[in-house]
Image (spheres, helix red, strand yellow):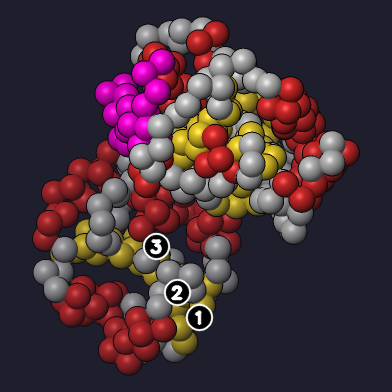
Amino acid sequence: MDVAGRAARLRDCLEVDALLVTKLVNIRYLTGFTGSAGLLLVLPDELLFVTDGRYRDQAAEQLSDAGVDATISIGLTMEAQAEILRTAASGVDRLGLEAHSVSWAQQRAMAATWFPTVGELVPTEDVVESLRIVKDEGEVARIEAAATIATTALVNVRDLLEQHPTEHEFGLAIDTEIRRLGAEGNSFDTIVGSGPNGAKPHHRASSSHRRIGEGELVVIDYGALVDGYCSDMTRTICTGTPNELQQRMIDVVMTAQQAGVDRVHAGVTGVEVDKACREVIGEAGWAESFSHGTGHGVGLEIHEDPRVTFASTATLAAGHVVTVEPGVYLPEQGGVRIEDTLVVTADGSRPLTHASKNWDLRSWPSPPTI
Protein backbone atom coordinates (compact mmCIF):
# COMPACT_ATOMS: atom_id res chain seq x y z
CA MET A 1 0.00 0.00 0.00
CA ASP A 2 1.26 3.47 -0.83
CA VAL A 3 0.49 4.96 2.57
CA ALA A 4 3.17 7.62 2.15
CA GLY A 5 1.47 9.09 -0.92
CA ARG A 6 -1.93 9.58 0.66
CA ALA A 7 -1.26 12.91 2.35
CA ALA A 8 -0.34 14.49 -0.99
CA ARG A 9 -3.58 13.22 -2.52
CA LEU A 10 -5.45 14.65 0.46
CA ARG A 11 -3.87 18.08 0.02
CA ASP A 12 -4.93 18.10 -3.63
CA CYS A 13 -8.60 17.93 -2.67
CA LEU A 14 -8.59 20.20 0.40
CA GLU A 15 -10.63 23.39 0.25
CA VAL A 16 -9.08 24.71 3.45
CA ASP A 17 -5.53 25.75 4.29
CA ALA A 18 -4.95 22.89 6.73
CA LEU A 19 -6.88 19.96 8.20
CA LEU A 20 -6.87 18.52 11.71
CA VAL A 21 -7.56 14.79 11.42
CA THR A 22 -9.05 13.42 14.63
CA LYS A 23 -10.80 10.22 13.49
CA LEU A 24 -8.39 7.40 14.35
CA VAL A 25 -9.23 5.24 11.34
CA ASN A 26 -8.45 8.19 9.07
CA ILE A 27 -5.17 8.77 10.91
CA ARG A 28 -4.32 5.10 10.36
CA TYR A 29 -5.11 5.46 6.65
CA LEU A 30 -2.81 8.47 6.28
CA THR A 31 0.07 7.36 8.50
CA GLY A 32 -0.11 3.65 9.38
CA PHE A 33 -0.47 4.46 13.11
CA THR A 34 -2.65 1.93 14.94
CA GLY A 35 -2.73 3.34 18.48
CA SER A 36 -5.75 4.62 20.39
CA ALA A 37 -4.68 8.26 20.77
CA GLY A 38 -3.37 10.62 18.15
CA LEU A 39 -3.99 13.83 16.20
CA LEU A 40 -2.71 14.64 12.73
CA LEU A 41 -2.34 18.19 11.46
CA VAL A 42 -2.08 18.29 7.69
CA LEU A 43 -0.34 21.53 6.73
CA PRO A 44 0.51 22.67 3.18
CA ASP A 45 4.10 21.42 3.41
CA GLU A 46 4.22 19.34 6.56
CA LEU A 47 2.53 16.60 8.53
CA LEU A 48 2.51 16.99 12.31
CA PHE A 49 1.56 13.92 14.33
CA VAL A 50 0.79 14.47 18.00
CA THR A 51 0.26 11.73 20.58
CA ASP A 52 1.02 10.96 24.21
CA GLY A 53 3.96 9.24 25.83
CA ARG A 54 2.53 5.75 25.54
CA TYR A 55 2.93 5.84 21.78
CA ARG A 56 6.27 7.59 21.38
CA ASP A 57 8.13 4.53 20.08
CA GLN A 58 5.16 2.94 18.33
CA ALA A 59 4.38 6.10 16.37
CA ALA A 60 7.99 6.47 15.25
CA GLU A 61 8.19 2.84 14.16
CA GLN A 62 4.86 2.70 12.35
CA LEU A 63 5.21 5.98 10.49
CA SER A 64 8.73 5.03 9.46
CA ASP A 65 7.60 1.59 8.27
CA ALA A 66 4.88 3.26 6.19
CA GLY A 67 7.38 5.69 4.69
CA VAL A 68 5.47 8.68 6.06
CA ASP A 69 7.52 11.85 6.48
CA ALA A 70 6.02 13.58 9.51
CA THR A 71 7.12 15.48 12.57
CA ILE A 72 6.16 13.51 15.67
CA SER A 73 5.53 15.49 18.85
CA ILE A 74 4.70 14.08 22.26
CA GLY A 75 2.39 15.86 24.67
CA LEU A 76 1.89 14.15 28.01
CA THR A 77 -1.45 15.94 28.58
CA MET A 78 -4.18 17.21 26.26
CA GLU A 79 -3.21 20.73 27.26
CA ALA A 80 0.35 20.07 26.13
CA GLN A 81 -0.87 18.58 22.86
CA ALA A 82 -3.13 21.59 22.31
CA GLU A 83 -0.13 23.88 22.80
CA ILE A 84 1.87 21.96 20.19
CA LEU A 85 -0.97 22.23 17.68
CA ARG A 86 -1.65 25.88 18.52
CA THR A 87 1.94 26.78 17.71
CA ALA A 88 1.99 24.74 14.50
CA ALA A 89 -1.29 26.22 13.24
CA SER A 90 -0.27 29.80 13.91
CA GLY A 91 -0.88 31.80 10.76
CA VAL A 92 -3.38 29.33 9.26
CA ASP A 93 -6.39 31.20 7.91
CA ARG A 94 -8.92 28.36 7.44
CA LEU A 95 -8.46 25.18 9.45
CA GLY A 96 -10.71 22.22 8.68
CA LEU A 97 -12.14 19.97 11.41
CA GLU A 98 -13.70 16.57 10.75
CA ALA A 99 -17.35 17.36 11.46
CA HIS A 100 -18.36 13.76 12.18
CA SER A 101 -15.46 13.22 14.57
CA VAL A 102 -15.36 16.44 16.62
CA SER A 103 -18.02 16.95 19.27
CA TRP A 104 -19.64 20.28 19.97
CA ALA A 105 -17.71 20.57 23.24
CA GLN A 106 -14.42 19.82 21.47
CA GLN A 107 -15.13 22.39 18.77
CA ARG A 108 -15.84 25.06 21.40
CA ALA A 109 -12.59 24.22 23.20
CA MET A 110 -10.63 24.29 19.96
CA ALA A 111 -12.08 27.67 19.01
CA ALA A 112 -11.45 29.16 22.44
CA THR A 113 -8.11 27.70 23.51
CA TRP A 114 -6.59 25.37 20.91
CA PHE A 115 -6.61 27.64 17.88
CA PRO A 116 -7.41 31.19 19.01
CA THR A 117 -5.23 32.72 16.28
CA VAL A 118 -6.70 30.70 13.41
CA GLY A 119 -8.92 32.84 11.20
CA GLU A 120 -11.75 30.30 10.84
CA LEU A 121 -12.51 26.74 11.92
CA VAL A 122 -14.31 25.05 9.02
CA PRO A 123 -16.40 21.87 9.37
CA THR A 124 -15.45 19.32 6.71
CA GLU A 125 -17.23 16.11 5.78
CA ASP A 126 -15.84 12.91 4.28
CA VAL A 127 -12.60 14.48 3.03
CA VAL A 128 -10.36 11.54 3.97
CA GLU A 129 -13.23 9.09 3.42
CA SER A 130 -13.49 10.22 -0.20
CA LEU A 131 -9.93 8.92 -0.69
CA ARG A 132 -10.55 5.72 1.26
CA ILE A 133 -13.53 4.73 -0.91
CA VAL A 134 -11.29 3.59 -3.78
CA LYS A 135 -9.02 0.76 -2.65
CA ASP A 136 -5.58 0.07 -4.05
CA GLU A 137 -4.28 -3.43 -4.74
CA GLY A 138 -2.70 -3.72 -1.31
CA GLU A 139 -5.96 -2.89 0.43
CA VAL A 140 -7.92 -5.34 -1.71
CA ALA A 141 -5.36 -8.05 -0.98
CA ARG A 142 -5.75 -7.55 2.76
CA ILE A 143 -9.55 -7.75 2.57
CA GLU A 144 -9.28 -10.92 0.50
CA ALA A 145 -6.79 -12.43 2.95
CA ALA A 146 -9.18 -11.69 5.81
CA ALA A 147 -12.01 -13.35 3.88
CA THR A 148 -9.88 -16.44 3.27
CA ILE A 149 -9.14 -16.74 6.98
CA ALA A 150 -12.84 -16.39 7.78
CA THR A 151 -13.83 -19.13 5.35
CA THR A 152 -11.14 -21.46 6.65
CA ALA A 153 -12.23 -20.86 10.23
CA LEU A 154 -15.83 -21.84 9.52
CA VAL A 155 -14.81 -25.03 7.73
CA ASN A 156 -12.41 -25.94 10.53
CA VAL A 157 -15.12 -25.79 13.22
CA ARG A 158 -18.02 -27.30 11.27
CA ASP A 159 -17.85 -30.66 13.08
CA LEU A 160 -18.91 -28.87 16.25
CA LEU A 161 -22.42 -28.54 14.81
CA GLU A 162 -22.92 -32.30 15.26
CA GLN A 163 -22.86 -31.67 19.03
CA HIS A 164 -25.69 -29.09 18.77
CA PRO A 165 -23.76 -26.31 20.47
CA THR A 166 -25.34 -23.09 21.63
CA GLU A 167 -25.14 -20.14 19.27
CA HIS A 168 -22.66 -18.58 21.69
CA GLU A 169 -20.44 -21.67 21.69
CA PHE A 170 -20.41 -21.93 17.91
CA GLY A 171 -19.73 -18.23 17.47
CA LEU A 172 -16.91 -18.40 20.01
CA ALA A 173 -15.40 -21.35 18.16
CA ILE A 174 -15.41 -19.36 14.91
CA ASP A 175 -13.90 -16.32 16.62
CA THR A 176 -11.16 -18.35 18.29
CA GLU A 177 -10.26 -20.11 15.06
CA ILE A 178 -10.05 -16.79 13.21
CA ARG A 179 -7.43 -15.64 15.69
CA ARG A 180 -5.59 -18.97 15.63
CA LEU A 181 -5.27 -18.64 11.86
CA GLY A 182 -3.46 -15.33 12.23
CA ALA A 183 -6.09 -12.59 12.03
CA GLU A 184 -5.98 -9.68 14.46
CA GLY A 185 -9.53 -10.52 15.47
CA ASN A 186 -13.06 -10.14 14.20
CA SER A 187 -14.18 -7.26 12.03
CA PHE A 188 -17.47 -7.14 13.98
CA ASP A 189 -19.42 -9.20 16.51
CA THR A 190 -20.19 -12.59 14.99
CA ILE A 191 -23.84 -13.29 14.17
CA VAL A 192 -25.12 -16.85 14.58
CA GLY A 193 -28.91 -17.02 14.31
CA SER A 194 -30.51 -20.46 14.36
CA GLY A 195 -34.18 -21.29 13.94
CA PRO A 196 -36.35 -18.30 14.84
CA ASN A 197 -33.29 -16.25 15.80
CA GLY A 198 -32.27 -16.30 12.14
CA ALA A 199 -35.20 -13.96 11.43
CA LYS A 200 -33.38 -11.26 13.43
CA PRO A 201 -30.88 -9.81 10.93
CA HIS A 202 -28.43 -8.58 13.60
CA HIS A 203 -28.85 -11.29 16.21
CA ARG A 204 -25.60 -11.66 18.15
CA ALA A 205 -24.10 -15.05 18.97
CA SER A 206 -22.54 -13.68 22.14
CA SER A 207 -25.96 -12.87 23.61
CA SER A 208 -27.60 -16.26 23.03
CA HIS A 209 -27.40 -19.63 24.74
CA ARG A 210 -30.00 -21.18 22.45
CA ARG A 211 -28.89 -24.58 21.20
CA ILE A 212 -28.73 -25.11 17.47
CA GLY A 213 -31.28 -27.81 16.69
CA GLU A 214 -31.60 -30.39 13.95
CA GLY A 215 -33.23 -29.37 10.68
CA GLU A 216 -32.80 -25.64 11.32
CA LEU A 217 -31.62 -22.82 9.14
CA VAL A 218 -28.57 -21.09 10.65
CA VAL A 219 -27.51 -17.62 9.52
CA ILE A 220 -23.78 -17.02 10.07
CA ASP A 221 -22.53 -13.47 9.43
CA TYR A 222 -18.95 -12.78 10.44
CA GLY A 223 -15.57 -11.47 9.36
CA ALA A 224 -11.88 -11.32 10.11
CA LEU A 225 -9.44 -8.45 10.45
CA VAL A 226 -6.06 -8.40 8.68
CA ASP A 227 -3.74 -5.41 9.01
CA GLY A 228 -6.74 -3.28 9.92
CA TYR A 229 -8.86 -4.35 6.94
CA CYS A 230 -12.21 -6.08 7.37
CA SER A 231 -13.86 -8.99 5.64
CA ASP A 232 -17.62 -9.56 5.67
CA MET A 233 -19.48 -12.69 4.64
CA THR A 234 -22.82 -14.32 5.41
CA ARG A 235 -23.75 -17.92 4.72
CA THR A 236 -26.95 -19.71 5.63
CA ILE A 237 -26.66 -23.41 6.33
CA CYS A 238 -29.14 -26.08 7.38
CA THR A 239 -28.40 -28.66 10.04
CA GLY A 240 -30.51 -31.24 8.25
CA THR A 241 -32.22 -31.57 4.90
CA PRO A 242 -34.23 -28.38 4.30
CA ASN A 243 -37.99 -28.74 4.18
CA GLU A 244 -39.91 -27.36 1.19
CA LEU A 245 -40.29 -23.85 2.58
CA GLN A 246 -36.69 -23.66 3.79
CA GLN A 247 -35.45 -24.78 0.39
CA ARG A 248 -37.59 -22.16 -1.35
CA MET A 249 -36.19 -19.45 0.93
CA ILE A 250 -32.64 -20.57 0.12
CA ASP A 251 -33.34 -20.70 -3.62
CA VAL A 252 -34.97 -17.27 -3.73
CA VAL A 253 -32.21 -15.55 -1.76
CA MET A 254 -29.54 -17.34 -3.80
CA THR A 255 -31.13 -16.10 -7.02
CA ALA A 256 -31.56 -12.58 -5.63
CA GLN A 257 -27.97 -12.42 -4.46
CA GLN A 258 -26.66 -13.57 -7.83
CA ALA A 259 -28.83 -10.96 -9.56
CA GLY A 260 -27.23 -8.29 -7.40
CA VAL A 261 -23.72 -9.58 -7.98
CA ASP A 262 -24.32 -9.64 -11.73
CA ARG A 263 -25.42 -5.99 -11.61
CA VAL A 264 -22.26 -4.74 -9.90
CA HIS A 265 -19.86 -2.87 -12.15
CA ALA A 266 -18.45 0.61 -12.58
CA GLY A 267 -21.06 3.22 -13.50
CA VAL A 268 -23.99 1.38 -11.89
CA THR A 269 -25.73 3.03 -8.95
CA GLY A 270 -26.23 1.48 -5.55
CA VAL A 271 -29.97 1.79 -6.13
CA GLU A 272 -29.75 -0.36 -9.26
CA VAL A 273 -27.92 -3.16 -7.45
CA ASP A 274 -30.43 -3.03 -4.60
CA LYS A 275 -33.31 -3.13 -7.07
CA ALA A 276 -31.94 -6.21 -8.82
CA CYS A 277 -32.04 -8.15 -5.54
CA ARG A 278 -35.32 -6.68 -4.34
CA GLU A 279 -37.19 -7.52 -7.54
CA VAL A 280 -36.42 -11.23 -7.23
CA ILE A 281 -37.54 -11.37 -3.62
CA GLY A 282 -40.63 -9.28 -4.40
CA GLU A 283 -41.67 -11.61 -7.21
CA ALA A 284 -41.45 -14.49 -4.73
CA GLY A 285 -43.98 -12.70 -2.51
CA TRP A 286 -41.53 -11.79 0.24
CA ALA A 287 -40.92 -8.10 -0.42
CA GLU A 288 -41.85 -7.16 3.15
CA SER A 289 -39.51 -9.82 4.50
CA PHE A 290 -36.40 -8.18 3.01
CA SER A 291 -36.04 -5.55 5.69
CA HIS A 292 -32.62 -3.95 5.09
CA GLY A 293 -30.41 -2.53 2.37
CA THR A 294 -28.55 -4.78 -0.02
CA GLY A 295 -25.01 -3.82 0.90
CA HIS A 296 -22.31 -1.39 1.96
CA GLY A 297 -18.68 -0.55 1.47
CA VAL A 298 -15.98 -2.43 3.38
CA GLY A 299 -12.42 -1.43 4.23
CA LEU A 300 -10.80 -0.14 7.39
CA GLU A 301 -14.36 -0.01 8.74
CA ILE A 302 -16.95 -2.73 8.38
CA HIS A 303 -19.56 -0.22 7.20
CA GLU A 304 -18.35 2.59 5.00
CA ASP A 305 -19.21 4.19 1.69
CA PRO A 306 -20.49 3.45 -0.88
CA ARG A 307 -23.93 2.34 0.30
CA VAL A 308 -25.90 -0.16 -1.77
CA THR A 309 -29.49 0.53 -0.77
CA PHE A 310 -32.83 1.71 -2.13
CA ALA A 311 -31.92 5.21 -0.90
CA SER A 312 -28.28 5.25 -2.02
CA THR A 313 -26.83 8.25 -3.81
CA ALA A 314 -23.65 6.38 -4.78
CA THR A 315 -22.44 5.39 -8.23
CA LEU A 316 -20.01 2.48 -8.17
CA ALA A 317 -16.50 2.94 -9.52
CA ALA A 318 -13.56 0.64 -10.13
CA GLY A 319 -11.78 0.01 -6.84
CA HIS A 320 -14.87 0.25 -4.66
CA VAL A 321 -15.33 -2.74 -2.36
CA VAL A 322 -18.95 -3.55 -1.55
CA THR A 323 -21.13 -6.31 -0.17
CA VAL A 324 -24.24 -7.82 -1.74
CA GLU A 325 -26.36 -9.41 1.00
CA PRO A 326 -30.11 -9.78 0.40
CA GLY A 327 -32.17 -11.75 2.89
CA VAL A 328 -35.59 -13.15 3.68
CA TYR A 329 -36.76 -13.31 7.28
CA LEU A 330 -39.87 -15.21 8.40
CA PRO A 331 -40.33 -15.08 12.18
CA GLU A 332 -42.02 -18.49 12.37
CA GLN A 333 -39.41 -20.16 10.16
CA GLY A 334 -36.14 -18.31 10.52
CA GLY A 335 -34.03 -16.43 8.05
CA VAL A 336 -31.80 -16.77 5.02
CA ARG A 337 -29.10 -14.27 4.08
CA ILE A 338 -26.25 -14.77 1.62
CA GLU A 339 -23.47 -12.20 1.39
CA ASP A 340 -20.31 -11.78 -0.62
CA THR A 341 -17.76 -8.98 -0.65
CA LEU A 342 -16.74 -7.81 -4.13
CA VAL A 343 -14.26 -5.40 -5.64
CA VAL A 344 -15.79 -3.37 -8.45
CA THR A 345 -14.07 -3.48 -11.83
CA ALA A 346 -14.65 -1.55 -15.05
CA ASP A 347 -16.66 -4.39 -16.58
CA GLY A 348 -18.05 -6.15 -13.54
CA SER A 349 -16.71 -7.30 -10.22
CA ARG A 350 -14.42 -9.85 -8.63
CA PRO A 351 -15.41 -11.75 -5.48
CA LEU A 352 -13.14 -11.44 -2.48
CA THR A 353 -15.11 -14.09 -0.56
CA HIS A 354 -14.65 -17.54 -2.07
CA ALA A 355 -16.71 -19.78 0.23
CA SER A 356 -19.27 -22.25 -1.04
CA LYS A 357 -22.92 -21.18 -0.87
CA ASN A 358 -24.19 -24.71 -0.39
CA TRP A 359 -26.54 -25.01 2.58
CA ASP A 360 -24.75 -28.24 3.62
CA LEU A 361 -21.63 -27.06 5.42
CA ARG A 362 -20.34 -30.62 5.49
CA SER A 363 -20.03 -30.56 1.70
CA TRP A 364 -17.73 -27.54 1.62
CA PRO A 365 -14.22 -28.36 0.40
CA SER A 366 -11.40 -28.09 2.84
CA PRO A 367 -9.57 -24.81 2.15
CA PRO A 368 -5.82 -24.64 1.56
CA THR A 369 -3.63 -24.45 4.66
CA ILE A 370 -2.99 -20.87 5.76
Q: Name the residue rendered at 14%, 73% in the picture.
A: 77
Q: Quadrant of the N terminus?
A: top left
User: Residue 117, percent across and down?
Assistant: 35, 90
Q: Left or right? Give the position of 285 relative to 298.
A: right
| Foreground of the two, 119 or 214 | 214
Which amino acid type corresponds to the residue marked 3 in the rendered image?
Lys
Mark 3–mark 2 distance (CA, rounded to whole Å): 10 Å
Residue 228 sits in which quadrant?
top left
In the picture of the structure, the residue carrying the numbered disc 3 is 23
To which quarter of the image does residue 74 belong?
bottom left
Alpha carbons under labels 1 and 2: distance apart: 6 Å
Point out the frontmost of discs 3 and 2. 3
Residue 269 badge = none
At horizontal 58% and vertical 56% (from top left) the residue drawn is 130
Q: Which residues are magenta?
A: 162-185
Residue bearing the label numbered 2: 97
Say if mark 1 contacts mark 2, CB within 8 Å. Answer: yes
Say if the magenta span includes residue 319.
no
Under tag 1, what secondary structure?
strand
Which is nearer the N-term, disc 1 or disc 2?
Answer: 2
Residue, disc 1: 122
Is 366 rendered above or below residue 82? above
